[in-house]
Amino acid sequence: MRALEPKDAPAVHRLAGAAEIADTTLTIPHPYPFHAAVEWIQKAQQERKAKTAYVFAITLRETKEFIGGIGLHLSPPNQNAEMGFWVGKPYWNRGYCSEAGKAALKFGFETLNLHRIFARHFPRNVGSGRVMVKLGMKYEGHLREHLRKLDHFEDVICYGILKSEWSETTDKRR
């Protein structure tokens, strides 16, 4: 993982432009215009400077090729953050989100000293749910028609992990 860079825009545009990505995320439209990729990167850089969110590029270890994004969107008064992530369809089911998620949890709990990190997914996005479980997140609920996406309401499934839970599982792996 690394900070997003302007040079990532073509890969973001290509990968986020897939209909399957738009279907399983709240804010990525389909079709996905190139300017949206540029704006997403600029927004991430501004949020990092303001310390309101930390969005990272998920890259292949060997080639450093951009394959997706993962972020922590902070709520400082509550010492928590919402984690969001996506990877391009060619990289699904290869463990990249789980690996990036572990690094994001470590960053959130050790560097940002967060108390809790949570994540949400649409019920049809079972892959994201599997990632959340692999990260040690606990199922916290199913919110019916909680978010509006385009012209309809979507159910959301919620997971979360406390720093104490993360520390306990991390200690056991050492």
Image (spheres, grey):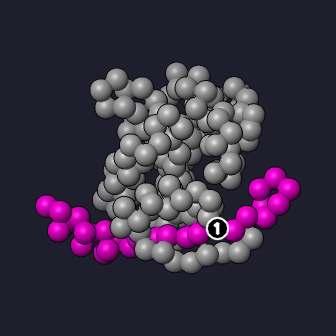
- The C terminus: image quadrant: bottom left
Q: Is residue 51 visible?
A: no
Looking at the image, which residue is at 68% across and 39% down?
19
Q: Is residue 30 visible?
A: yes
Image coordinates of residue 110 in percent, x first then y, are 30, 59
Is residue 62 on the magenta stretch?
no
Asked which quadrant contains residue 152, the reply is bottom right
Please tell me whether residue 126 is drawn above or below residue 4 in the rendered image. Answer: below
Q: Nearer the viewer, residue 44 or 166?
A: 166
Looking at the image, which residue is at 45% across and 65% down?
117
The amino acid beneath tag 1 is Val
In the shown orientation, is residue 172 left or right of residue 153? Answer: left
Is residue 150 on the magenta stretch?
yes
Residue farthest to the left? 174
* Residue occupied by mark 1: 156
Image coordinates of residue 14 in percent, x first then y, are 61, 27
Please tell me whether residue 102 is drawn above or below residue 165 in the rendered image. Answer: above
The segment highlighted magenta reads: 147-174
- The N terminus: image quadrant: top left
In the shown orientation, is residue 134 left or right of residue 147? Answer: left
Please tell me whether residue 31 is drawn above or below residue 104 in the rendered image. Answer: above
